[in-house]
Amino acid sequence: MTHRNDEGGENAGGDDEGGENAGGDEGGGENAGGEDAGGRDDDSSAEAATASIPFDGDVLRYTGATASVAPKRLGPLLREAQAHLGPRLDTYRRSFERVFADDEREVFLAPVGRWDDIGAELELPEHESDALRRTHGQQLRRIGTKTGRREELETALEIREAVVIGRYRGVSDR
C-alpha cells in the first residue's frame, strides 16, 4: 500500500500491479553530484532521498499520469515534501484538523494556499507545488473511498487542502 525507498527497498501493498513504482524511483532519481532534480544542493537533499512516501500505488499512478511533472520527478518531489513535513508533524497536530490517521500516515485539512506556502519554502516551481497538492488530495479521496467517507472528504477539499504526513522513524501518536 505504501511506497518506501528505504535501504530494504520495500514496495508494499497489493495495488501496485505490474511491479512498477509510479513514483519514478528506479535507481538514479538523483544525480551523482548530490544535487536533486530541482537543482537544490544542500543537506535536505540527502534527507529527502531516504524519506518515505505515505501514498497508495494507485494514487501515485493517477497523479503521475495527471500532474504536470514527469513521473520520474514525482517520487523525489514527494520524498522532499515528506522530509520537510515529517519534523512538523506535531505542529500540524496542534494547528490543523486531523481527518484520518493510521499506522502509516496522518492526514490534515489545511487552509487553501498551504501548498503554495510549502512550495515557496521548498523553492519549488508552481507546477511542482500543484503536483504535491494533487497527490495529497487524491490520497485523501482514496482514504475516503476505503472508509466510506468519500463524500464528506470530497466536500472538505472544496474549501481546504489535504496534507498527508508519514508516520515513520519512531513517530507515534501523542
Image: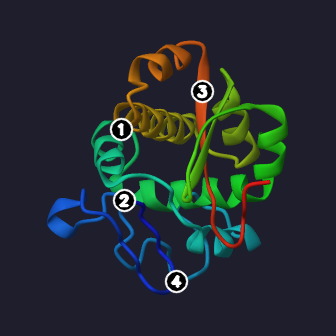
Q: Earlier in the sequence, mark 1 or mark 2?
A: 2
Write down the residue under mark 4.
32
Please tell me the numbered disc located at residue 6: none
* Residue found at x 42% / y 61%: 2
* Residue found at x 78% / y 59%: 87
Q: Secondary structure at mark 4?
A: loop
Write down the residue under mark 3.
161
Q: Secondary structure at mark 2?
A: loop
Task: Look at the image and tell me in which quarter the C terminus lies.
Answer: bottom right
Closer to the observer: label 3 or label 4? 3
Left or right relative to 43: residue 55: left
Which of these two is toward me, 132 or 171? Answer: 171
Q: What separation in Å lies between label 2 and label 3 (alpha carbons)?
A: 22 Å
Q: Earlier in the sequence, mark 4 or mark 1?
A: 4
Write down the residue under mark 1.
146
Write down the residue under mark 2.
1
